[in-house]
Amino acid sequence: MVRTRFAPSPTGYLHLGGLRTALYTYLYARKMGGRFILRIEDTDQEREVPGAVQKIYDSMHQAGLTYDEGPDVGGDFGPYIQTERRDLYPKYAQELVEKGGAYPCFCTKERLDQARAEAEAKGETYKYDKHCLHLPKDEVQQRLAAGEPHVIRQNVPLTGTASFDDALYGHVEVDCATLDDNVLIKGDGLPTYNFANVVDDHLMQISHVMRGTEYLSSAPKYNLLYEAFGWEVPTYVHLPVVMRDSSRKLSKRYGDPSFEDLLDMGYLRDAIINFIALLGWSPRSEREFFTLDELEQVFDLDGLNKSPSIFDMNKLTWFNGEYIRKLSPEAYLEAATPWLKQALDETKFDFVRIAQLLHNRTEVFKDVPEMVDFLSEMPAFDNELYTHKKMKTDPAVALNALQAMRPVLSGITDWTEENLHSTLMSAIAEAGMKNGQVLWPLRIAISGKASTPGGAIEIAYLLGKDETLRRMDQSIAQLNG
Ligand code: GLU
């Protein structure tokens, strides 16, 4: 049975690289009819950010990545938070010590710091010198019995190689001579990532370990642990990094958005997920649009790409626009309403009509307030805005048109778009004017903007009669200097 896990550390928001790992891990489990597990890796307590665990649950929920087992949903292999498993790691460390794969180390910080400084002075990479591996057995027993502070280190062979096979990167092999005897259990009794990931993946019966390539070079060392325990090694799938551009990784530190940021900006969940799925995986066809359900059917390891992918914000925005256009009018209205409310008083404007006018022009919801704020307040504008070559309009043409239409609009009693349309059209025809030479300046005169959702008639309708006439008067006065 395929069992995969997403194993974030609670150090902040879910960044997009993490979201992609979570997504692929989820999709693979679903595709294979397996189980998807959430595990919280919080043994590095110094890096833990308060509230981050809850944020992980929320983000997974918002992303639609339902896990079958996890801290807040339970399961047969819990607990799923590593600090809640703390009593179980020393037992396995002890087993490893007995099997020769690890040993207690009593070296003081001073000794280690000095050795590190000496290595650095010589321009060498520091490696622990296995000092405590060679302590006499009874001395070790005595010191342990006396409760002397210590850590447990991995005993990496001095010679030979360590290797493993990655589903994506193939055979990865390193010389043991280059590996350090890393700490497995810290002085506080908690395991390091190096140890906990191996023990937990084994105990939780994880069949496929999917995670970022930053762990690729350490995986041979983890493999030594599996071998020392005599445990079956899971299939490893390391995923290439997500880049911001050709020179750097996507990173919150440089202001790149997290998943939560994107949702806050008004990107749609489905658009983000679809877009993220294609950062490093290809369906090997021209098809670009997939729902999460569809991804669950088509995702496979063969479509994964080894080379780093680039997160292109413009492409995501385009994707989002496509998703927005596919929303039903009702769904669009619902999604747009909070954004409309930022700029407009709901009791004064016809949100349904505004939503219809905006639907095809929206790429990201965060743009909505500034697309409509002219309705609640007329912006200052320059008369030169009336100059439009193709429409053959300029301030003089505009003044003429506005003066001609002012009484016409003032005479309309039932202020509907239909009435506005028919009344204006016949007045324009009667006056022998051109549609564009009237409607273009009128739109500017009542919106103050070069580009608006909807034309003169829609905007006049939305503003209402009083406000439309008031704006016309103001603009006529401005044209008269
Ligand atoms: N806790 C690790 C991280 O957040 C996860 C690595 C793994 O999936 O094994 O990077």
Image: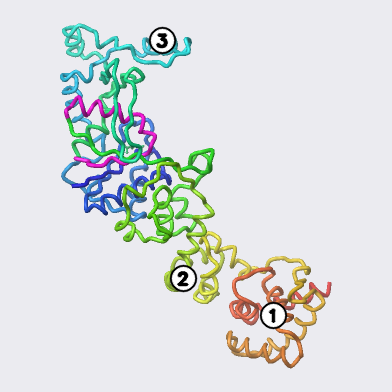
Task: Decide which of 249, 278 is in the foreground and name it.
Answer: 278
Q: Amino acid at mark 3?
A: Gln
Q: Earlier in the sequence, mark 2 or mark 3?
A: 3
Q: Position of residue 36 (x, y in %)?
A: 25, 48
Give me the residue at 26% from left, 45% from top: 4
Ligand 1, by image quadrant, is top left
Task: Decide which of 402, 237 is in the foreground and name it.
Answer: 237
Q: Position of residue 62 (x, y in %)?
A: 36, 55
- Res. 114 mark: 3
Give me the residue at 15% from left, 19% from top: 98
Left or right: residue 58 compared with residue 322: left
Mark 2, other Cα within 10 Å: few <14 / some 14–19 / many ≥20: many
Q: Can the viewer see residue 8 in this picture?
A: no
Q: Earlier in the sequence, mark 1 or mark 3?
A: 3
- Give the magenta-colored segment's residue range: 205-230
Circle 2 sits in a helix, a strand or a loop, which is it?
helix
Instruction: Look at mark 2 in the image and give the residue it sits on.
Output: 333
Q: Can the viewer see residue 465 in this picture?
A: yes
Q: Amino acid at mark 1?
A: Leu
Give me the residue at 45% from left, 64% from top: 323
Mark closer to the observer (2, 3): 3
Circle 3 sits in a helix, a strand or a loop, which is it?
helix
What distance separates the C-alpha of mark 2 from that of mark 3? 66 Å
Q: Position of residue 75 (x, y in %)?
A: 18, 46
Left or right: residue 157 compared with residue 119: left
Circle 1 sits in a helix, a strand or a loop, which is it?
helix
What distance separates the C-alpha of mark 1 from that of mark 2? 27 Å
Q: Earlier in the sequence, mark 1 or mark 2?
A: 2
Q: Is residue 456 magenta?
A: no
- Res. 439 mark: 1
Q: Within the image, what quadrant is residue 401 found in?
A: bottom right
- Res. 93 mark: none
